[in-house]
Image (cartoon, rainbow, N blue to C red):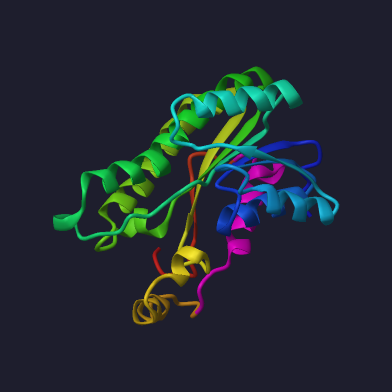
Amino acid sequence: MLNLDGRIAFVTGASRGIGRAIAQRLSSQGAHVVAAARAENARSVVDEIAAAGGRAEALSLDVIEPGAAETAVAATLEKHGRIDVLVNNAGITRDQLMLRMKRDDWDAVIATNLTAAFTLTQAVLKPMIRQRAGRIICISSVVGQSGNAGQANYAASKAGIIGFAKSVALEVASRGITVNVVAPGMIETDMTRAIAERAREEWESRIPLKRLGTPDDIASAVCFLASDEASYITGQVLAVNGGMYT
């Protein structure tokens, strides 16, 4: 069993789907989870974690609000003295064919999925460097590796996450900080449940394991990368996609 006792883990987009599963799994392995989401949306996952005997707190955070990342990280450091794990998970989609895509939809996806990872990572790096230890895990997507029609903005943001993480990994490796990426395939979430049944079946037919993944599949990968067992892994992309893209 992975042991994260005493670690402070900061998870964005923690209120539902993959982020919620990550928060729950990190807590189950002993971490104290700061579950960040808009408004009070993370309150229910914190209550579930507490009911299971874990430790967590909700933090209101809009990742695209100027200065919000720095403020949230500063508040966490003031309360706990350290941040050991950052999971950049917050993400949105605004799908549309390129010829019809509005600039606002491009900007919103890039700001939430990519720029927010920059601001949060930059905010945690100084304390992690002082600690000479840290784990930064960014959630990308199979779409960031393969592309997908109608998702130029989303694919660009998720491909950008990969290049971003690989670059930062090289910058901070000597300080004991690892930076890695988990790239989910098609996962059972509210986002994928909204896809038309025909499109969903077409996606599923492309998965060699013949099933969609679950949020717990992604949470398991994140927990591994957050643990001491992954101390010699950095700058890598861990694809959790059932074999649909290799």
Viewer-side residue, 131 vs 196: 196
Q: Nearer the viewer, residue 50 or 229?
A: 50
Q: 4 left or right of 124?
A: right
Q: Position of residue 17 (x, y in %)?
A: 57, 59
Residue at screen point 45% across, 77% down: 208
Front residue (pair 34, 163): 34
Q: Image check: 8 left or right of 185?
A: right
| Left-right relation of 51 to 147 | right
Quarter in which the C terminus is drawn: bottom left
User: Please, what is the dominant secondary structure of the magenta stretch?
Assistant: helix
Look at the image and give the residue range highlighted in magenta: 211-232
Specify the farthest residue to the front. Answer: 39
Q: Is residue 80 left or right of residue 38?
A: right
Q: Position of residue 166 (x, y in %)?
A: 43, 37
Relative height, residue 228 to residue 20 (above, below) = above
Task: Judge whether 142 appears above or below 5 on screen.
Answer: below
Residue 2 seen anywhere in this rendered image of the structure: no
**Rendered location of residue 182, percent (x, y):** 51, 51
